[in-house]
Amino acid sequence: MNTTLEIVLIAAVIVFVLARRLMGEPAVGKRLLLLPAVLGVIGLTQVSEGAVGFLLVSVALSVVFGLLRGLTIRTYEQNGIVMLRYTAMTIVLWVVSIAARLAVGFVLAPSGAQGNGLMLVVGAGLLAEGLVVMSKAVRVRGQVVWSKGRNGAPHRTSALLDSWQEKVHGTRHDSTR
């Protein structure tokens, strides 16, 4: 994929995620875990061999910032569903993580490698964030859903997420699978 196009697509995804999560949205396991993992795998297939050290530093930095962002995200129950909302500190961490990525690219990246592995880097950071948010979400008294229902259909749940919540709360959720 063209590096400029990849950067534009990643920026659009980040803006979309920021906007939705600032307003508050259900903590949907599929969006928090599966989609970042897919993004990372796609990014992994696009990595060239020339900039492995740069890529490792970028991924490590992204994971650290993802973990920190996850700690700043507010999780709460609304109408029986676990919700998440970005805070001002989450936005600050996004800005700092983007600036850090650019700085690392300026200092360490071999010529032309700045965009190399960008999807992998963003996917790793979002996955780290999602893991922290899910660990917080299962502690909230509400249903953690796997995917949102469409056209009035009930939300889909996950046996794994349900059992994780049951272990934390010692209770069983009534859910539609």
Image (cartoon, rainbow, N blue to C red):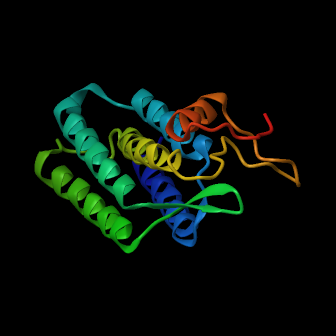
Residue 90 image-quadrant placement? bottom left
Residue visible at 57% across and 72% down?
Answer: 23
- Numbered circles on residues, count: 0
- The residue sitting at the front extreme is 170
Tell me residue 17's x, y (percent).
53, 60
Tell me residue 65's x, y (percent).
29, 52
Residue visible at 30% across and 63% down?
Answer: 93
Residue visible at 47% across and 30% down?
Answer: 41
6 sits to left or right of 104: right
Image quarter where the C terminus lies is top right
Using the image, determine if residue 26 lies above or below residue 125.
below
126 sits to left or right of 114: right
- The residue sitting at the left extreme is 107
106 sits to left or right of 88: left
Tell me residue 106's x, y (percent).
16, 54
Residue visible at 87% across and 48% down?
Answer: 153
Nearer to me, 37 or 116: 37
Using the image, determine if residue 91 lies above or below residue 137.
below
Nearer to me, 70 or 113: 70
Nearer to me, 127 or 157: 157
Tell me residue 50's x, y (percent).
22, 29
Residue 60 image-quadrant placement? top left
